[in-house]
Amino acid sequence: MGSIRVQELFIYPIKSTQGIRVQEMELTELGPAYDRRWMLVGEKNEFLTQRKFPQLSQLFVEFDEDGLHLFTPSMRRIKVRVPITRERIDVKIWQDVTQAIPADAETNQWISELLRINVTLVYMPESSKREVRGKSKSGLSFADTHPFHLITTPSLIDLNNRIVNENLLSLCFRPNIVVEGDFAPYDEDQWDLIKVGEAEFRCQEWCSRCQIPTIHPFIGVRQGSEPLNTLEKYRLWKQEIWFGQNMILVSKAKIRVGDPVSILTRTENSLAEMQAHG
């Protein structure tokens, strides 16, 4: 295996909205700093995503220490400050219920106009607790299942080569870390403990894919059944489609584009081997 390095880094300040490409990333147990600490909920305080509202990919976000700047191609820019009120509401994300702080009324009205339903933008304060399910005991932001998500360029290139007239971007899969190098496609299936720069991560499980990769990451329109239709032909196991790795943080350090990546330990079985054994 040749050299491996970080090709791209992404942060998603508001769950299921436009990602931000960054050159360096500060790491926390909950995920990259600023990543998915905000989320949109509906009238029953249940989380909203591109699965039902693909136009969320056109909600662009910039962030600083005070909060967020939101804008779309057709709507005015607004500033959203990190709320300091003591008000807390229970919000639901998958099977978890945790406490969050609602944003101000002007912000919620602005986003409600975009989605044409009543929504509330909420912030996860440090006092809120949410954990990765299973034995890891890692904390978790508003990300679906794990604090960090990794994909690799060799696997993405292989997938694109299998799809006619398609050139999927890494953003279609909403990774935090994109790794490139001279290794076989899907070699990451067997990565266990990896080192990125001076930080270490534990690969917990392959990432099960939903419908979001079928949505164009900038236009906000569902583009048909690809890439899921192609992935289903060779990445289906236990009725799920798998692409990429979900990870937790083992040792903290700032990481940067261009950092070397080392595979410290590996697991025995690839997805192809698991498929072969039923």
Image (spheres, rainbow, N blue to C red):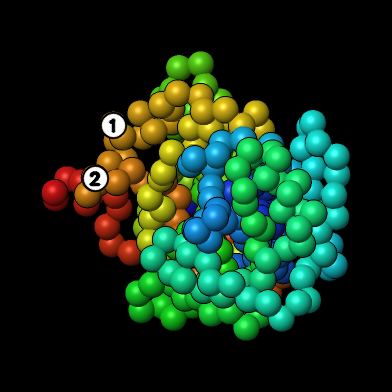
Which residue is disc 2 drawn over?
Answer: 239
Which numbered marker is on residue 275?
none
Q: Looking at the image, which residue sits at the far bottom?
A: 127
Taking the view exactly as shown, the residue that stands out farthest to the left is: 278
Q: Nearer the viewer, residue 271 or 108?
A: 108
Q: Residue type at mark 1?
A: Lys
- Per the image, the residue denoted by label 1 is 233
Residue for point 44% across, 81% down: 137
Residue at 69% over, 39% down: 114
In this rendering, does residue 213 appear at all?
yes
Categorize mark 2 by other alpha carbons within 10 Å: few (<14), some (14-19), many (20+).
Answer: few
Q: Secondary structure at mark 1?
A: helix
Identify the residue at horizontal 28%, vertical 31% (top origin). 233
> For residue 231, what is the image quadrant?
top left
Left or right side of 251 for 104: right
Q: Residue at x 38, y 72 (%)?
A: 133
Label located before the other in sequence (2 or 1): 1
Q: Residues within 10 Å of mark 1 (few under 14, many from 20)?
A: few
